[in-house]
Every structure is written in C-alpha cells, then in structure tokens.
Image (cartoon, grey):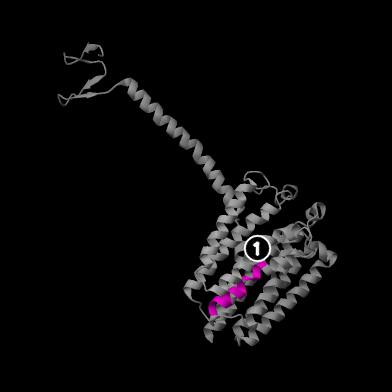
Amino acid sequence: MPRSHRSRYGSDTPRCAWVSRRSTSTKYFCPRSASAAHASRRTATDQVRHVSPALRRRLRDYALLTRLDRPIGTLLLLWPVLWALWLAAGGMPDLRLLIVFVVGTLLTRSAGCIINDFADREFDPHVERTRERPLAARRVSPSEAIVLFVVLMLLAFVVVLQLDARTVWLSLVAAALLASYPFCKRFFAAPQVYLGLAFGWGVPMAFMATTGRVPTTGWLIFASTVIWACIYDTFYAMVDREDDRRIGIRSTALWFGRHDLLVIGLLQALMLGLLIWIGRIAHLGSIYFLSLIVVTCLFARHLWWARHRDRAACFRAFLDNNYVGMIVWLGIAVATLQS
C-alpha cells in the first residue's frame, strides 16, 4: 500500500492521490503512470512524424512516375479521341461515353509512362533530361513500378467494360500497343510511328462505341493522329538526339538526320491534307476550315522555332502542339454544332 503523507487539508491521503479543492471526491493520479502515458504518446507522435514525410515522398515519386505533374502527354492523347467522339456523334457526345474515354485516357497514359520508364530504366540515368526520374534515380523499385502499372491497367479495363463488347475487344489492341511501344525503340528506326499507332487507337474505339462501326472518316482521323504523333514526338526526340545516339536508342530525329525539319514540314502538310479531306467528307463548315488555317500558322511557327535545333526551342515546339489539338477540336465542335 502506498505511503501516506499529510495533505494540505489535514487528512492522510495516498501519495498518488489528489484531492479536488471544489469537491470532497478524490481523483487518483500516479506520476509514474502519467509519465508512461506521456512517453507512449510521444513515441506514437514521433512515429507519425517519421512515417508521414516518407509517405509523402513515396506518393510524390508515384505522381512523378505517372507524370501527373506533366499533363501534356494526356492532352496529346486525348485530343484525337475528342475529335472522334464529336465527329461520330455529329455534335456533343453522350456524357457517359465522354467520361469513360477521358478517365480511360488518363489511366492509360499514366500506365504508359510507367512501362516506358521501366523499359528505359538502364538508359535514363545517362540522359540529362531523364536521370532524375524515380526509376532511374532508384527511388522506386522495378517491382513497385510493375505493380502500379498492372493496377492502372486493371482500372482502365474496368472503365472500358462500361462500353460494348466490340469496343472492349479493340481496347485489347490498344493495351498491347501501349505495353510494347517502349521496347521497340531498341530495334525500330522510327518508334514515333509505333507511338502514333498507340496514341491513335482511341479513335476507332470512339467511333465503335458511338456508332457501332468505324467509317472512312474514323480511319482518316486515325491516320492523321499517327502522322501528328510523328510530328510532335520528333520535336521531342530532337531534345535528346545526342544522348540517344550515344546510348543506342532509335528515333526519327536520328533517322531523319539533317533533313529532320524538311520531313516534319512534309508530315505537317500531309496531316493538313487529311484534315481537309475529313472536313469535306463530314461536310464541316467554314469555321472548321478556318481552324485549319490557324493550325497551319502554328505548324509554321514550330518549324521556325526549331530552325537552329536548339533543345529548348524543340521542346517548346513539342509542347505547343497541344494548341494544335485544341484548335482542331474547337473547329470540329463548332462546325458540328452549327450543322
């Protein structure tokens, strides 16, 4: 039994007791228990403080791995899908379809970035622009990346299951193209063409989901998307040209050589020709063709920017292609609304 001592109220109370001034009740409070509880709370708080920064860093690395900080890739993938949805519907598409394709685009683009970094994890540390990527810097392990890739692809498949069976079958082709693209850079001289196939496959999917078939217009948009991907990704590859040559990665920037801007200009003209053909087949109005004039001016500006092959200028031309996709979509959206 604890030793007693004389309290200030003249009564004997246990050593660990405290008598309230305002009542006759006694509240027991043991200093040893209090110290233990305080130490326990402090340990738990310290653990939270240590875990939270680590968790934040991990989530940040996952966000960088999936390029959530750089939406340009998602937009370049999304614009042709929006062209197709608006043309297939003859105006504003069904809201459910629009949501499915937007969410699916975001998920697949993020998954594509992961598998790309996984395939390039031995090359990226030797490239100035990519050496700080999470996989290249060993902040995320290859096994973690594969797990995250599989999770995102499964989520994308759940999303696409909201569509009809034929569109679901088409999505399997898209998944195969997406997963295999990063590995073709080792042996295919023009991997940008393969990238165009992967980025453009959402177009036939959009037509199939909307109309139940893929008409000539759909395949023409698909072809123009493949060409467009070759255009903007060649600008992108021009940024890394010397690094790619040194480590053995193939690209159209290397394949075209000193004729790179000439070939890009020819591809731009070919894409514009296809877009004009699409406008005539779909009976799009003058607003659409006016948008193509704006696109022509943008294309000319990109060639002018990149004329000295400066890395920053080439990257700027790549980024500016986002406005090409947006203006073509605006032209289609307004033209179909008017009709």
Looking at the rendering, the stretch of residues picked out in magenta corresponds to: 198-210
Residue 158 as seen in the image, left or right of residue 254: left
Q: Residues within 10 Å of mark 1 (few under 14, many from 20)?
A: many
The answer to whether residue 245 is left or right of residue 151 is right
Asked whether, in this view, residue 86 is left or right of residue 300, the answer is left
Farthest left residue in view: 24
Magenta part mainly helix, strand or loop? Answer: helix
- Residue type, mark 1 in image: Leu
**Foreground: 195 or 280?**
195
Residue drawn at point x = 59 percent, y = 62 percent = 108
Residue 309, by quadrant, is: bottom right
Q: List the residue tagged with mark 1.
A: 178
Up-down relation of residue 99 to residue 36 (above or below): below
Quadrant in which the C terminus is drawn: bottom right
* Residue at x-position 70% and y-position 48%: 131
Residue 2 place in picture, x, y as percent? 26, 14
Q: Residue at x 53, y 44 (%)?
A: 56
Q: What element carries label 1?
A: helix
Point out residue 198 in the picture as x, y percentages from the top left corner. Answer: 66, 67
Q: In this view, does 80 lie above or below 133?
A: below
Picture layout, residue 287 above or below residue 76: below
Residue 24: in magenta span: no
Report the residue at 71% width, 81% height from top.
273
Asked if residue 326 can be seen in this view, the reply is no
The magenta stretch spans residue 207? yes
The answer to whether any part of residue 204 appears in the image is yes
Nearest to the observer: residue 197 or residue 164: 164
Provide residue 300's location: percent of width, then percent of height: 73, 72
Return the x and y of residue 39 as percentages of the image width and height.
40, 26
